[in-house]
Amino acid sequence: MALIVSNLSFQYSRAHLVLKNLSFELEAGRILGVMGPSGAGKTTLLKIIAGITSEYKGSVVFNGVDLKTLSYWQRAKLRREKIGVFFSEVVPSPNFGVSTLAKALLNNRQATKLKNFLEQTGLSDLGKVSISDLSEGEKQRIWLSFVLARGPEVLVLDEPDANLDSFHKDVIHDLIVEEVEKNRSTAIIATHDVSFVQKFDVLHMRDQELMGYQT
């Protein structure tokens, strides 16, 4: 799925500008790293691309479809069917296990993929343990495994490597890259890990603006 962002601006108020005139394109099968200091607008950019935030100026176009033309429910349907979303600031902690959640959210093929991802991330023995009892790093690995198991056309990931030790960071990074290559999907990833994104396209942000686009 190709992504075209044109003249994108967003502000919470006249005095609080968050994004200013961002423009870039991303082809299917590519990974885009989004880097910049805290407060640069990375999370806001990803929320707009995911169709969560809609009050912006400019345009975000997926495969010829401008998100501005879609209703709230149409954007929700797009996320459910084509976009995998993860934000490290919001990691749910339900009072039931992974097995119960998988039955509710995934089909058989996706559940099989989830099982494989959990094995690779060292979580295969936690199927019946309540997610609320797990560490933040374990919760994060579980939810990222769910996102990847759905096989979305677009991955929108905000700091998927936060709260992870170096070993599990590498595991998650490898899984993301493998899934993008296998499915020819598109990924937009906000991260502070320079070593991870240096081999991909990188969007450098600072003070709400695009400071550079490295390909």
Image: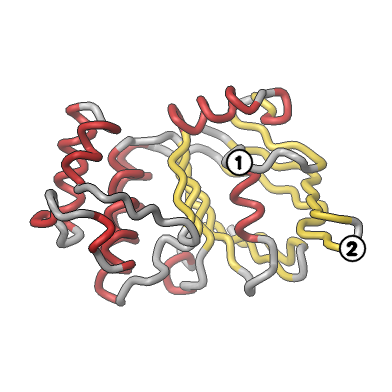
Residue 118 as seen in the image, left or right of residue 17: left
Element assignment for label 1:
loop
Percent of width and height locating residue 29? 45, 41
Q: Quadrant of residue 53?
A: top right
Element assignment for label 2:
loop
Is residue 177 something that shows in the picture?
no
Percent of width and height locating residue 115? 15, 44
Percent of width and height locating residue 51? 61, 37
| Observer-nearest of 55 and 194 | 55
Q: Quadrant of residue 5?
A: top right
Name the residue type under label 1.
Ile
Question: Would you name the residue on which mark 1 appears?
Answer: 52
Residue 112 as seen in the image, left or right of residue 131: left
Mark 1 or 2, nearer chain start: 2
View extreme (right): residue? 14
- Give the residue at x 17% y 27%: 108
**Quarter of the image containing the C terminus?**
bottom right
- Give the residue at x 26% y 31%: 104
Question: Would you name the residue on which mark 2 appears?
Answer: 15
- Give the residue at x 69% y 37%: 60
Residue 161 higher or lower than 153, as above or below: below
Q: Quadrant of residue 136?
A: bottom left
Name the residue type under label 2.
Ala
Q: CA distance from mark 1 to mark 2?
A: 22 Å
- Give the residue at x 46% y 72%: 193
Is residue 122 something that shows in the picture?
yes
Percent of width and height locating residue 67? 67, 30
Category of crowding for the residue at label 2, using alpha-carbon neighbours closer than 10 angstroms: few (below 14), some (14–19), many (at least 20): few
